[in-house]
Image (spheres, rainbow, N blue to C red):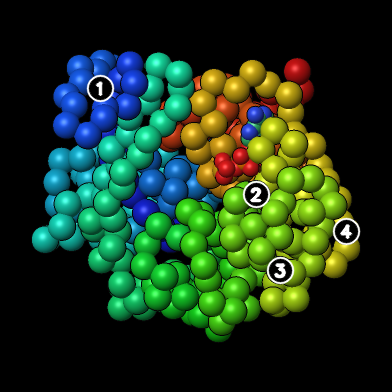
Amino acid sequence: RLVVLGSVNADHVLRVPHFPRPGETLTGHGYQVVPGGKGANQAVAAARLGAPVSFIARIGDDAIGRQMQAGFAADGIDVSAVERDEALPTGIAIIYVSDEGENSIGISAEANGALSPEMVKRHESMIADAHTLLLQLEVPLESVFEAARLARAHGTRVVLNPAPARPLSAELLALVDLITPNQTEAELLTGVPVTDEASAREAAARFHQLGIQEVMITLGAQGVYCSNPSQQVLIPGFRVTAVDTTAAGDTFNGALLAAQLAGHDFHGAVRFAHGAAALSVTRLGAQSSIPSEAEVEAFLLA
Ligand code: ADP
């Protein structure tokens, strides 16, 4: 079983002709509230792609929180560790999408900020019983640390997708078995600007020095650079026409772990994750863009 610990956000999306300037009021269109949050996206991806998933998260006692929780359950996720906060609303993101396709985003942690180390401890047995724990950085860092510490103590594999980019302690990084940064995050954590295979190799070497055995640096359309004790290799992704890259990394992480749990070998799991992520970039939205296992299988055969 895979345990995902992380954020839940309601994404409020408004299309605008251009971003409003200070003091300006603009008329937008196409307003939508869609399920997002990196933790939720990765849990949904892994579940939709075949993994048994339990989700540790915190939502508000509000309609949107309940609606998203029902959505997780409909995707087959065990939501017994999704707790409802009495005092805070569900996490939110306010997103403007301009006609040029650029976005401008403000987020507020709300209930995600109350996912405390004490809450993590309440779910210690769930972490202990799991094969793998998947973490990101949209919940308090001390809780990420506590979860990684408990997982390590119980022999559960720790996977960290260090997004959004923020500085991390050597103590936390030393608890990680597999790290999956994108280029920005890899640069922030190692000081190496990652643009190609050679710079990715250098950044991966820094992660190994910090005690991390397995490194997978995602390089957008270029694919993923993988470095572990048995190989160092750049594995290209699939060529598709990108419509919206939101949640590409989240889909890659969920799909990779789902394929590994299903017993795919290393290259097979990366190929499956690339296929799932490529399909997600051809579609709009976060959780709405995540494909099913059957869709990925069909894409890989085509
Ligand atoms: P993030 O979304 O976290 O910034 P990346 O942009 O590195 O992550 O993308 C993660 C993965 O998504 C890539 O390794 C690849 O499999 C897939 N991907 C992203 N962008 C594209 C693209 N333009 N074409 C095909 N695949 C893509």
**Of the pair 130 and 219, the residue shown nearer to us:** 219
How far apart, in angstroms, are the residues tagged by discs 3 and 2?
Answer: 13 Å
The answer to whether residue 155 of the structure is visible from this angle is no
Query: Which image quarter has ligand 1?
Result: top right
Nearer the observer: mark 2 or 1; the answer is: 2
Q: Earlier in the sequence, mark 3 or mark 2?
A: 2
How far apart, in angstroms, are the residues tagged by discs 1 and 4?
Answer: 46 Å
Q: Amino acid at mark 3?
A: Phe
Q: Amino acid at mark 2?
A: Gln
**Residue at the spot of label 3:** 207
Q: Position of residue 4 (x, y in %)?
A: 47, 58
**Residue at the spot of label 2:** 183
Q: Amino acid at mark 4?
A: Gln
Residue 154 placement: quadrant: bottom right
> Any mark on residue 31, and which?
1
Q: Is 146 rendered above or below residue 24? A: below
Q: Position of residue 104 (x, y in %)?
A: 37, 35
- Residue at 79% across / 45% down in the picture? 196
| Labelled pair 4, 3 in contact (Cβ < 8 Å) | no
**Of the pair 264 and 62, the residue shown nearer to us:** 62
**Residue at the spot of label 4:** 231
Q: Earlier in the sequence, mark 2 or mark 1?
A: 1
Q: Amino acid at mark 1?
A: Tyr
- Residue at 18% across / 26% down in the picture? 24
Q: Position of residue 295 (x, y in %)?
A: 60, 25
